[in-house]
Image (spheres, grey):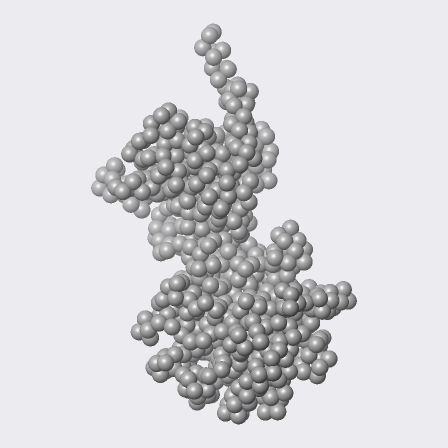
Amino acid sequence: MSVKQASMLTKQVIRDGLSYILRGGLRIKNGHLPIEQHDIPHDFIGVCVASNANPATDDYIVQQLQALGIKRVRLDMTYGDLTRDNTRFLRRLIAEKLAITLHLLQPFDAAKNMHLKTEQAIWRQFLSEVLDVFGSQIQAIEIGNTINRKRWAGYTLDGFLHAWAIAHTEIKVHGVTLIGPNIQDFEPFYNISLLKTFRNLHQLPDIHSDNLFSERTTEPERFDHRIFKYQWARIFKYNLIKKARLLQKIGRDFGIKDSVSSAAFWAIYRIQRLLPDGLQKQADYAARYFLLLAASGSLTHVNWGALICQREGLITDALTEADYPDLERVAYYKNTDGALENYQHHPSFSAVKTVANLIQGTRYIAPITTANGLEIHHFAQNGLHIHAAWTINGKTALLSDIYSTETLQTAKVLHRDGDTFTQHPNLITESPIYLIWNNGAPTIVNAQLAKDVAIHAHVADLQYFAFKDVDWQGLVLAKNTADAQLLMHKLHPINLIAPNKDSALRHARNAIWAVPDPRNISATHEAAKELTIKQPVKMYPHKAFLDRFKPSKAKRSWNGAMELMRRGIATAHPVAYFEKIGDTTLKQNFYLCEFVQADANIGQIFAAYAKGEFDFLGLKPESVYTQLAIYCHAMHNRGIHFRDLSGGNILVNIDHNKQLSFSLIDTARIHSYNHGIAVNLRIADLTRACHKLHWAGRIRFMQIYLGLSGMQFTWQHRLQFQLYDFKVSLKRTIGRKGIKRLMKRIKGNT
């Protein structure tokens, strides 16, 4: 049998999928928007569970389910489990009167050989034994395990159809609800073709199942770029809600009323490829995932993946990535690992608990706003009105812009994790909050994102405070209200006056100067911690025209720093930005950040190497090239195109072991992406960083940098460096800098 014949994606699957699509099967008007006015089931949220040889683990899991407020579980069983720990655990779940879906699956080798009569007989015997013992005590049986992932499930299409036919017969004889076929992710060709085949064979499941992941689009709200690439994603609008609604539609078109998502999660290590706050982001995504699917009105229940697992669970087993089983837990959650005493809640545990307690059993009223970066969804129950509110990553909205003062004063506001805010937050961020009223539905003033503002939602021990005063607006990042008010008072923008050139740290297009931090004034002025202030003071005519269509320079500096912080890239810590409303000069704006002490910058180090100093500050070139390459590679992989990565903007501190730490300044030009950036953009950054370095050093640095991605330094890359050198030389001869030098020479000769 050829590889193509053995694949699940057969010609028949493709034909069935294309035929359905061309007949308009995936057409659904405003499919990316939720369905209004529908009830959320009381057991909408479930979780996949497993135990181990220790009976105390059974007790622990039951306690955690009770704490979560979850009454629905999914348990994997395979050959031999009737005489192992799984049966003991299943009996305990039954005793707790939980709604149990028993996920029955074959070992990989058995699935691979389902064309054999002997394997078919073993499978039939297993099903019969399980159903005889537990068929009357469970809610449903699910058949199929990520079957469109052959490397996990093992099935060929024919083999799976044999397994399904046997299971359908046995399960129907016992009168048990059948769920299937458990497609992985959103790949509707498989759903369409299999359901069509099942209908023709009179073998349809009672409930249609899919593992509806959003992990590879990073955020639950994102339009899926994997379907039609980034440039088409916003046109076709395949977000999580549209996928759920389409899966429901596909099921109903083939005669199945209900659909479910059997398992989905965010693996912490995958999140951390882009964002360092993996635990917090998993919690954000978990809450947002369940809220969106509840709003979709398309699924009868939705399960989180493994309850206990260090990689993806709501609870960690405290093991390492190396301890993860060879087979993905989404395909087979065999057992929990690690020692019971080491189990600890991930933040996602509290996030899911809060969603379950607030949303299950409510009525979904309508979206206040959705699919535009700001999500506010209205749920109601027994006179209570609940708004679940959040933004996509890095964005924000001011609560005071959306709700009236009176409306906010009568609201109870809960954190993502269920805690009540003692003082209402100023902002809606990527970490969901819940606003609750018991005196009627709230009035919305203006539901939209704060314009062109980025924030880092998970800055430890700090909060954001909106600044509005007569003609000025901005944001302040501070520890508490007292510190924020002190900053707003002492460093109010009307009091900020740029010093002359001799007193400034820099004075060209921007004035940059240092002031004492009013929060840290000590006995002597010299001991005070300093803040750096940046204000644009000179605007060339073409820049003045172009910048009218951009955020203020202060806001751009703030946004760039926030995008770096979100991705774990060190920068001067932002404190505030202020901008004058309606300013036509484009100069009445200020960016404040903490002053960064540095031993040197990369420009100084590279200039020294270019002069033949190969031990500058005790730093050997190879060590500097390697450490900087790793740093820049991580920055680019996390979606940052710096666009002004000159050597002077890369500050360096050196520890006693000659290990370097880097910090980036001058962040106003940054472009950020939700994925690693293209090679040409990376090279554009690095040509600036290496401008003062000699060619031998450039080549070695680029060999290290590109080698991290398995690439080589080619003549095309060299050409980009040469073009940048040429561009700089033009600026120095016929550009602004060249003209300035010429005028100085003329003046000197007169």
Could you say where residue 262 lies in the image, as x and y percent from the top left?
A: 55, 74
Could you say where residue 269 lies in the image, as x and y percent from the top left?
A: 44, 60
Q: Is residue 439 left or right of residue 529?
A: right
Could you say where residue 82 lies in the image, as x and y percent from the top left?
A: 46, 87
Q: Is residue 694 visible?
A: yes
Could you say where residue 64 lies in the image, as x and y percent from the top left?
A: 40, 77
Q: Give the position of the N terminus as an image quadrant.
A: bottom right
In the current view of this chain or complex, which residue is farthest to the top?
750
Q: Nearer the viewer, residue 587 or 429?
A: 429
Q: Nearer the viewer, residue 402 or 329?
A: 329
Q: Nearer the viewer, residue 37 or 473?
A: 37
Q: Is residue 356 above or below residue 573?
A: below
Q: Is residue 422 visible?
A: no
Quadrant position of residue 175: bottom right
Q: Residue at x 55, y 31 (%)?
A: 719
Q: Is residue 246 left or right of residue 524?
A: right
Q: Residue at x 51, y 27 (%)?
A: 725
Question: How many marks do you count on the picture?
Answer: 0
Q: Residue at x 49, y 74 (%)?
A: 332
Q: Residue at x 52, y 74 (%)?
A: 108
Q: Nearer the viewer, residue 106 or 310?
A: 106
In the current view of this chain or complex, which residue is farthest to the right?
23
Quadrant position of residue 335: bottom left
